[in-house]
Amino acid sequence: MPALAPSTAFRWLLAPATSAPHRGNAIALAALRILLGLLWLYNVSWKRPPDFGRSSGSGLYGFTKDAVDHPVFPPYSWIVDTLVLPNFAAFGWMVLIVETLLAVLLLTGTFVRIAALVGVGQSLAIGLSVAQTPGEWPWSYWLMIGAHLVLVLGVSGAFLAVDGARADGRSAALTTPPVRLLQLWGVVVGVAGVVALLLGVGSSPFTASGAALGGSGLSISLGRYNLVAAVLLIVVAALMVAAATLRRSMLAMAAAGIAVLAALSLYVQLPWTDPLLGGNNTSAAFLLCAALVSAMLAPLLHARSGQEAHAHS
């Protein structure tokens, strides 16, 4: 990539990560992007507010303290010991927000270059914290950094991505149209809701820890959902599919609004009490994926509907 002026570089970061790649390359990069999104989606589940493991010395606090106990880069260890650990609650929320954004943006393919660049930084920070901890494999973090760099420089937002849908016809043969992308996400959310509903049959509708979609065995999860949350997922999915099928942006915005409110309810309740939806941070991030896709694609549905009406007039 040639040298870019700061303003040009910023526009490049914000632009859809599309051009004219070989179809196989676009699909492979989309698979890598989704895989990394699933990595972050799973790993937000154990970053638990309000103290993020400080009281027990475990969880995020324990891993962060490894930067001091098992230094990788002494200046970084000093920063952690002097600035991070004394203000750990704020740091924990920052990590949760950053990693949630990484999961949501990478899975949905939205502002992929920015997300991947943040992923490089976050992977580096994790490596500097734990790479020398006994039992860790330092190459894990080199590979994470490298994988995110591939997304920064590659055409990783063309296929199955919001970036592709907002690319105004660039690489049209490879990008996923807004209607199809919204339908696809609606199906994914709907299947998640149906599976959660089936797994939760016989349990209390408001059980504090709902059925798990995935688990720790393979470190892949879409979150936990009780029966009420499962029904909510199905409602959101139905609105997404209906919005795409009928080309109605208001239905997509309704889906986005419901999903955002559900995610916010989890974030508000999880630090202090059992959540009404029986979910965790991963559940909230998955709901935010549905919300972001719906909100970003809603105006594109309206534009498409207007174009078709004009063509038929």
Image (spheres, helix red, strand yellow):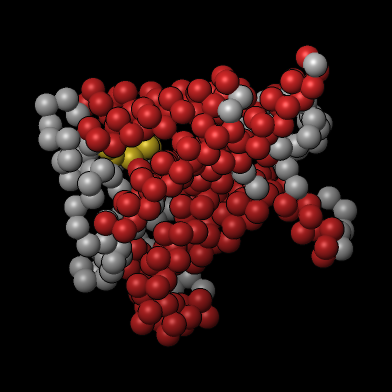
Asked if residue 28 shows in the view, the reply is no
Q: Position of residue 105 (x, y in %)?
A: 56, 46
Which residue is located at x 16 percent, y 25 percent? 201
The C terminus lies in which quarter of the figure? Answer: top right
Image check: 124 left or right of 47?
Answer: right
Q: Position of residue 199 (x, y in %)?
A: 22, 26
Compared with residue 280, is residue 128 higher up or lower down, i.e. above or below? Answer: below
Residue 244 appears in which quarter of the rendering? top right
Which residue is located at x 34 percent, y 56 percent? 267
Which residue is located at x 40 percent, y 25 percent? 190
Which residue is located at x 62 percent, y 35 percent? 297
Along the line of sight, the residue nearer the viewer: 62 or 248: 248
- The residue most toward the front is 313
Asked if residue 4 shows in the view, the reply is yes
Q: How many marks overall?
A: 0
- The residue most toward the bottom is 82
Along the line of sight, the residue nearer the viewer: 137 or 46: 46
Compared with residue 203, is residue 183 higher up or lower down, i.e. above or below? Answer: above
Residue 206 appears in which quarter of the rendering? top left
Along the line of sight, the residue nearer the viewer: 292 or 192: 292
Q: Position of residue 71 (x, y in %)?
A: 44, 73
Image check: 163 left or right of 277?
Answer: right
Q: Position of residue 162 (x, y in %)?
A: 63, 37
- The residue most toward the top is 312
Compared with residue 165, is residue 6 higher up or lower down, i.e. above or below? Answer: below
Image check: 211 left or right of 16?
Answer: left
